[in-house]
Amino acid sequence: MRAITEFELIQDNDRIMIGVSGGKDSIFLAYAMAMMRQRIKKKFELMAVTVNPMFSDSFDLAPIKDFMQRLDIPHHSFDVDIKGAIDAQGGKDPCYTCAFFRRGAVNRYAKEQGCNKVAYAHHNDDAVETLFMGLLYSGQVHTFTPSTYLDKTDITVIRPLVYFREQEIIDAIQYHQVQPVPSPCPNDGHTIRQRVKELIQEMSIENPQLYPHLASAMRENAVGELWPAPKNRKEMKKAYYDYMYGNQ
């Protein structure tokens, strides 16, 4: 409710497609959105879609369909050969390829179904890890936002779980005795994100304020003094000649 209110994520007449992988986060998101549909004074529709990445032949959609039926959320699914796309990349980051094709497929399907919003189950830990990953692996200060408008598809991506810690979701799933679908990803538990997650946990033993500090750093008003953007040779040419040959 905090996230929905602060970032104004849901409006009257929204048609919201929920991306449901079957994991704990997306299952919890579907449940939370169903509860919001009952409680808040906004009229909006929910749908759900699951992309089968074709990592294996044993991906069982039945538990997902059953849970969506219990929540009264229409559910659809289709196959996308993400495994083939990853294999064709020749060793490049599989997580980036998977996310790119999965999000693209969900967003296109949402557009086809007349939805104006797509809801993803990214939580607070995901946002903090993304920030830290950017610093460590790309030298950039960035993370995803609670609401993102995609002008190419005229779709708004919303992330209603951004204030939930991952452990809170785990506790809720266990309390309600909901069994998530095991991830079919062959790299699950062996990704850069997993390493960053473990690094935050390790560093937090010595510095318990590490996580809250990283979370605070995601805010725009947290940005302090930074170096200016690097200049290219053309931009530095005049100053260079001035230093080398004097102001002629």
Image (cartoon, rainbow, N blue to C red):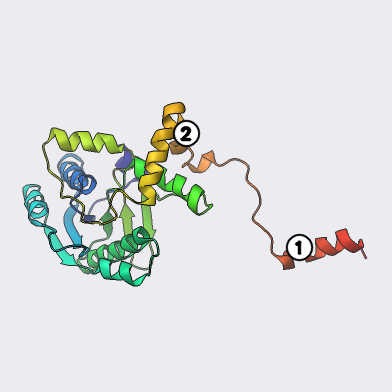
Residue 208 seen anywhere in this rendered image of the structure: no
Which of 82/90 is in front?
A: 90
> Looking at the picture, how far across and down is residue 9, in whole percent?
31, 48
Callout 2 amino acid: His
Q: Quadrant of the C terminus?
A: bottom right
State the image quarter where residue 238 is shown: bottom right
- In percent of the image, x 29 and y 45: which residue is there? 160
Picture mark count: 2
State the image quarter where residue 80 is shown: bottom left
> Looking at the picture, how far across and down is residue 60, in whole percent?
11, 57
Considering the numbered disc 2 on the image, is that residue within a helix, a strand or a loop?
Answer: helix
The residue tagged 2 is 213
Please tell me whether residue 200 is drawn above or below residue 122 in the rendered image: above
- In percent of the image, x 37 and y 42: which residue is there? 197
Callout 1 amino acid: Met
Crowding at mark 2 (Cα within 10 Å: few <14, some 14-19, many 20+) = few
Q: Is residue 58 left or right of residue 84?
A: left
- In percent of the image, x 30 and y 66: which residue is there? 101
> Looking at the picture, how far across and down is residue 140, in whole percent?
52, 52
Considering the numbered disc 1 on the image, is that residue within a helix, a strand or a loop?
Answer: helix
Q: Label 1 to label 2, Cα distance in Å?
A: 37 Å
The residue tagged 1 is 236
> Looking at the picture, how far across and down is residue 157, in whole percent?
32, 55
The answer to whether the residue labelled 1 contacts the one labelled 2, judged by CB atoms less than 8 Å apart, is no
Q: Report the residue that reaches farthest toward the bottom.
A: 88
Sequence-first tag of 1 and 2: 2
